[in-house]
């Protein structure tokens, strides 16, 4: 009887918390979309900003965000997945591996502004890359690494050891087992974690604040060694730093709608991959 009462109480508590959080999220999204959808149009997406950022569109910010995400992906995904494979498949349980795992999880909790300052010191100043897409992308890659390593390792742990032992018993090497059995089976989980991590990185402002993002550029970013515009920083500047905040507020709401739709699309892709994998199982 006590267990049943405790179960009902926990269910009510969990359901109530979920409803409250969802309600607040719904209010915020309604406010943003009701004020920002009127500003979103093909002209808004395909044109350069003008007249002191009070008119025009956000094309340079979209292109910059796209390039930034590509650099982050090329750096963080291969390195993060490889590290997770080593930790889960090759590294033997020891004090050292436990320290490495604990360090990775601690890195995931570090504020993003710290990564921005570290990227400024390492990529911009020490390696002399300057403020550029490359410096900002590598900084976001460092930010994304702990999450990619953790989610990839969890996906690898879901593969039963019996599958590994069966392939090894048939004469396959450990590398062949990982390549032909473990990775294909864990790929949906890995991709889900990667996409969710990249969608989070695409909305970060602090790590790119000191490493390459600019308030306004009147040309499209064509090189990784150039400064760039990005949607989250563009939204930050329009909302807090512009000298005519009330004038550009509709543009700020429109930018937030585009950024939310971008992140939401990436999350939908991740959920679709997970759902498709479950239906196949």
Image (spheres, rainbow, N blue to C red):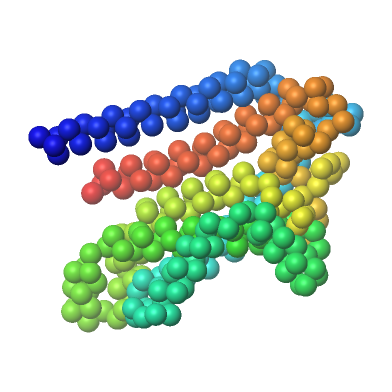
Residue at point 26%, 36% (across, down): 10
Position above or below: 169 against 140: below
> In terms of image quadrants, where is residue 92?
bottom left
Residue at point 63%, 54% (across, down): 112
- Residue 227 appears anywhere in the view: yes
Residue at point 18%, 73% (across, down): 166
Residue 101 lies, in percent from the top left, at: 44, 69
Near-viewer residue (39 or 17): 17
Position above or below: 118 against 246: below
- Tell me if 255 is positioned left or right of 16 in this view: right
Q: Quadrant of the N terminus?
A: top left
- Tell me if 8 is positioned left or right of 181 in this view: left
Residue 80 lies, in percent from the top left, at: 50, 65
Residue at point 39%, 41% (across, down): 272
Position above or below: 118 against 195: below
Near-viewer residue (133 or 242): 242
- Tell me if 211 is positioned left or right of 183 in this view: right
- Residue 71 appears anywhere in the view: no
């Amino acid at each position: 009887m006590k267990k049943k009462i405790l179960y009902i109480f926990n269910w009510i508590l969990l359901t109530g918390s979920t409803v409250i959080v969802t309600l607040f999220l719904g209010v915020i999204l309604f406010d943003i979309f009701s004020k920002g959808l009127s500003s979103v149009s093909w002209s808004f997406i395909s044109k350069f900003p003008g007249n002191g950022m009070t008119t025009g569109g956000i094309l340079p910010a979209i292109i910059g965000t796209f390039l930034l995400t590509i650099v982050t992906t090329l750096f963080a995904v291969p390195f993060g997945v490889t590290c997770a494979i080593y930790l889960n498949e090759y590294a033997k349980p020891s004090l050292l591996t436990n320290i490495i795992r604990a360090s990775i999880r601690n890195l995931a909790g570090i504020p993003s502004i710290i990564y921005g300052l570290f990227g400024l010191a390492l990529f911009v100043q020490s390696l002399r890359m300057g403020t550029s897409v490359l410096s900002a992308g590598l900084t976001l890659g460092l930010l994304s690494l702990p999450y990619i390593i953790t989610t990839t390792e969890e996906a690898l742990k879901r593969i039963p050891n019996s599958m590994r032992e069966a392939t090894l018993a048939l004469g396959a090497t450990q590398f062949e087992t990982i390549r032909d059995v473990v990775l294909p089976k864990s790929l949906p989980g890995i991709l889900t974690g990667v996409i969710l991590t990249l969608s989070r990185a695409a909305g970060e402002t602090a790590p790119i604040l000191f490493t390459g993002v600019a308030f306004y550029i009147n040309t499209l970013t064509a090189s990784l060694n150039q400064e760039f515009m990005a949607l989250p920083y563009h939204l930050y500047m329009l909302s807090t730093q512009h000298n005519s905040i009330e004038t550009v507020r509709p543009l700020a709401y429109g930018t937030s709608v585009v950024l939310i739709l971008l992140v939401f699309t990436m999350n939908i892709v991740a959920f679709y991959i997970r759902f498709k994998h479950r239906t196949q199982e």
